[in-house]
Image (tube, rainbow, N blue to C red):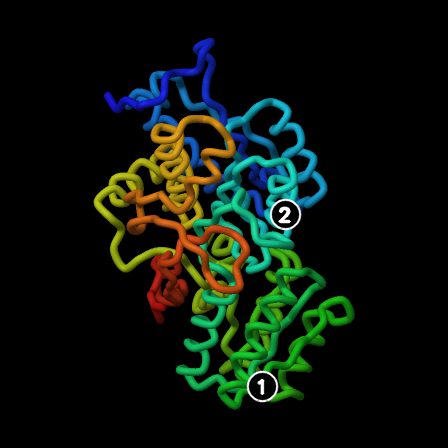
Amino acid sequence: MITSAHPPQPDGSPVQIGVLVPLTRPGWVEAGRHVLAGLELATREVNDTGGIGGSPLELVVRDTAADPEKAATAVDELARLGVAALAGEYHSVVARAAAGRADALGVPFLCSSAVLDALTEQPTDWVARLSPPQSRGWRIYADFLLGAGHSRIAVATQPSVYWASGTRILRDHFAAHGGTVVELDMRGLTPAAVCEALVDRRATALLLLVGHPEPAVPIVESVRGDERLAEVLIGAPAGQPELAEWAALLGEDGAGVPFLRYLPERLTPLGAQVETALRERLGEAPSFVAFEGYDTVTVLADLLRTHGTDRARIAASWPRVAVEGTRGRIDFSRTPGIGVWQWASPPVQVVDRDPAEPGRFRVLHTG
């Protein structure tokens, strides 16, 4: 049994972690389900090995439904309930609202899967993150496009801090390498009009910086059905093609769409075991967000066992984390331009679904 220098909860009650995940629309429900599966699996394993100093670890789950206000309200409620820390969230704009509230209330928050660089308005010691910042991942994606000969790309966008940030990262990186980014505002365009714009602008790639399944799926169907655009690459850096829903909705049309995935070439030995358990739990192959969920609880359990349940002590201990996760050794540091504690070296891949076998992923580029 794993023991701790810190005693169990005085009244024998569970040590609670508040969990934020999108479980209903308009949130990306499948992503939320995978994050939660990872969180739950790791929690079960923590409890099977003695819990937190003999006290069980318990998740208190709240559905954010991709709503920043709902997430902020949930943080308030979870803080009042006395959770030791917060975990989870997939949508960047929602995570930003949760992180800001956690910072204001003094509740440690380990963000599992949101990448927006500006996760908080100002630097904070209360928030840490496992996923790579958007500026790193999307520059790697831009390097992949440039290396493949795409110097003139179009981005189909919707209003969002996240999409606007992604567009800016791509535009700056392409401009530095002599490339061009054309922005297509989906508030005023139909999928058919997107096709016309691609022809008129002579773009060789179209990136989907839009919601899933609407309007991403109709855009893909329209572009794939236009013979004039047979050579145009469709890309989705935000990772929509990772999950099974994408393939179910689009079939062959959804293959060959490069996206960002945060997995290494090889999982750690722990990761290989977790992959098997997650596959059984989910009834399908686990996505990278399921591994992010598992790693989140792995980190928090280590902090709770080592430093106890005091919120301020947990937040002060981010720089002392050194944990073997499913995708590598996890530690946190300060990254220039990032206001939260950041895992400095999460793996980044550009992958797609193999057109010859859409259930299989091809690694196209690593960073």
Residue 134: x and y in percent read 51, 63
Tell me if mark 1 has few (under 14), some (14-19) or many (20+) residues whose alpha carbon lies within 10 angstroms of its own.
some
Tell me the residue at 51%/70% (across/down): 235
The answer to which quarter of the image holds residue 218 is bottom right
Tell me the residue at 36%/43% (across/down): 320
Quadrant that contains the C terminus: bottom left
Q: Is residue 227 visible?
A: no
Q: Secondary structure at mark 1?
A: strand
From the viewer's perspective, tell me whether residue 209 is left or right of residue 318: right
From the viewer's perspective, tell me whether residue 114 is left or right of residue 94: left
Tell me if mark 2 has few (under 14), some (14-19) or many (20+) residues whose alpha carbon lies within 10 angstroms of its own.
many
From the viewer's perspective, tell me whether residue 297 is left or right of residue 151: left
* Amino acid at dot 2: Val
Q: Earlier in the sequence, mark 2 or mark 1?
A: 2
Residue 68: x and y in percent read 68, 45
Tell me the residue at 31%/36% (across/down): 277
| Residue labelled with disc 2 | 94
Q: Looking at the image, which is closer to me, 54 or 354?
A: 54
Residue 38: x and y in percent read 41, 38
Residue that lies at the very extreme toward the right in this rendered image:
188
Q: Is residue 48 above or below residue 195?
A: above
Q: Secondary structure at mark 2?
A: helix
| Residue labelled with disc 1 | 180
* Amino acid at dot 1: Thr
Tell me the residue at 45%/68% (across/down): 258
User: Number of marks in the image?
Assistant: 2
Q: Looking at the image, which is closer to me, 172 or 352?
A: 172
Q: Looking at the image, which is closer to me, 251 or 24?
A: 24
Q: Is residue 339 above or below residue 226?
A: above
The answer to which quarter of the image holds residue 339 is bottom right
